[in-house]
Image (spheres, rainbow, N blue to C red):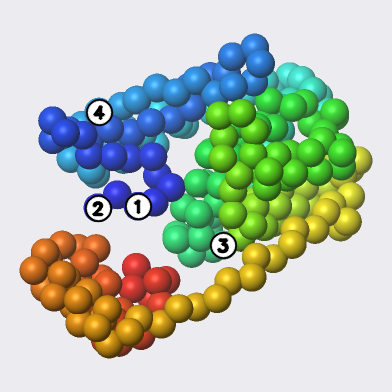
Amino acid sequence: MARKGENIYRRKDGRWEGRYIADRAKDGRARYRSVYAKSYSQVKQKLQEAKEMVQKEHRIQNLPEAEKPFSEFLYRWLDYIRPRIKESSYVKYVNLIELHIDQEIGAVLLGRLNTEMIDEFINTMLTGKEGMEPLAAKTVTDILGVVRNVIRYINTRYQRLDCDLSQITIKKEESRMRILSREEEEQLIRYLMEYPSPMNCGIFLTLFTGLRIGELCA
């Protein structure tokens, strides 16, 4: 079963498709390619091999660190932390990097990355721009957390960056929990029993056990 953040999907024709960033246009935008297979496990293996090949092809080993793109260090950091964290956390970080961080500031050269640039990036994530809806404050908070960790990783292993992110803050969203009425609960139960599916079974299970999403997925 595909996990969120993997960029793996089952097509209408029954095949599995995996998408990855193959290269970048001159303006820094990501260009995607796809691999296909008859099963999830096969396409996952193909996708991993394709990503590794792209990383090898795009590495510019002879350049000073300051002249390499920030994207290079995003994926170095992922390789570094993978043995140290849960797989679910790793998938979450990959998702944040591939969908947001790498696409927006991955092409910036390390020597040019600064506080103002990252602050502007975070603000864009919060407010949105043409062709992109604003992200939830929780998602942007997670994005900022990843960027901070990558900057810390770079500072301790490669070079000191002109990036002080301590003053970049994100206002928390106030959310109110609404509890289902007895009538709504009974209506939901009838629907879940009438239309069984992996997702509906999960909802049914949490309704009667109180499991959290993380516990259910595990």
Q: Say if 44 sits above or below 53 in the image.
A: below
Residue carrying label 1: 3
Q: Nearer the viewer, residue 158 or 149?
A: 149
Secondary-structure class at tag 3: helix
Could you say which quadrant of the image residue 199 lies in? bottom left
Q: CA distance from mark 4 to mark 1?
A: 17 Å
Q: CA distance from mark 4 to mark 2?
A: 15 Å
Residue carrying label 3: 84
Secondary-structure class at tag 2: loop
Q: Position of residue 135 (x, y in %)?
A: 59, 48
> Badge 2: few (under 14), some or many (20 or more) residues near its Cα, within 10 Å?
few
Q: Position of residue 95 (x, y in %)?
A: 50, 46
- Residue type beneath disc 2: Met
Secondary-structure class at tag 1: loop
> Looking at the image, can residue 205 be seen?
no
Question: Viewed as shown, does residue 208 lie left or right of 107?
Answer: left
> Looking at the image, can residue 122 be seen?
yes
Q: Position of residue 91 (x, y in %)?
A: 47, 53
- Residue type beneath disc 1: Arg
Question: Viewed as shown, does residue 166 lie left or right of 188?
Answer: right
Residue carrying label 4: 36
Sequence order check, earlier mark of 1 and 3: 1
Q: Which mark is residue 1?
A: 2
> Badge 1: few (under 14), some or many (20 or more) residues near its Cα, within 10 Å?
few
